[in-house]
Amino acid sequence: MQSSRIYSSDEVVEETDIEGLYWISNYAIKTTRLSRIVLPSPGQGVFTIVTHAADFSEQEHGGYEFYGIHIGQVDVLTFLALDDRVMQGDFVDCRRGSKTFHKRVKFAFTGDPDKALVIDRGIAHIFDNLKGMVTLNQPRVYFDRNNPYYSSDFDVVNVRRSSPLDEFPSVIVNRFPLPYWLCRSALKKQRAKIRAAGSRNHPFIFHKGSEKLILTPVEKK
């Protein structure tokens, strides 16, 4: 299996028991003891910012209700809020053929602009205690041909939080790093779709065998 560690400039600061799940040092400039200017990580030059507002979760855990699994995207997540919260992450290796297939890893962590969490393709992940947290994602995008698990519109396979370990899927991940110019083209296409769409609510995609179910939440009034 191809590792996500394709950038030799990655400075790994902490490993986990799942290959492809680890912390790296960020490229950042100190402006005060705690303040930072976070520079782009090496790679394709794309990023997303996710805000988890007060209405993000109505549950006591303050997190997601579904695990997410990316097929063509390696997440490189920086948790930016510097408060005293402790977040929890729960991860399951769903990569078909992996030496750690269906291995589960859990750990707690705090916000830290100096490091980023790398989550390789095919690793299911879910986080708790995220209300008020802003995350910066500088993903590394991969492509492939005729991968039934991959959607270029929404690259995610979801698993319900309550699912037992043996119900997590076995997925095939994309293999080839997307060229820089294609990343820019894909972003342009996404922006055009957002402008044209009647709804901007993020869908949830579930796989069960060969079946695929797509659910789009209705916004509360």
Image: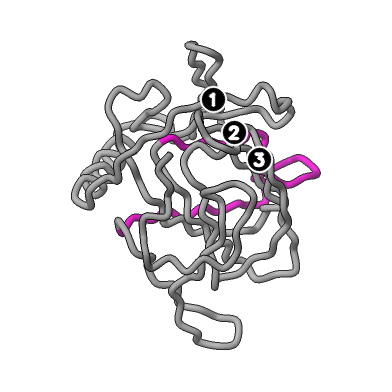
Residue at the bottom extreme, as displayed: 32
Q: Nearer the viewer, residue 71 or 15?
A: 15
Decide: few, some or many residues near mark 2? Use Cα within 10 Å; few <14, some 14-19, many ≥20. some
Residue 201 drawn at (x, y percent): 48, 34
Q: CA gap, disc 2 to disc 1?
A: 8 Å
Q: Report the quarter where the C terminus lies.
A: top right
Q: Label 1, on which residue? A: 170
Disc on res. 64 = 3
Along the polypeptide, which appears first: circle 2 or circle 3? 3
Provide the secondary structure element on which disc 1 rests.
loop
Residue placed furthest toward the left = 181
Q: What amino acid is at disc 3?
A: Tyr
Mark 2, secondary structure of its residue: loop
Do callouts 2 and 3 mark residues in contact (Cβ within 8 Å)?
no
Q: Picture coordinates of residue 184 (x, y %)?
A: 23, 49
Magenta stretch holds residue 51 = yes
Q: Residue at x 74, y 63 (%)?
A: 85
Q: Which residues are magenta?
A: 45-71
Residue 31 is labelled as none
Cβ–Cβ below 8 Å for labels 2 and 1?
Answer: yes
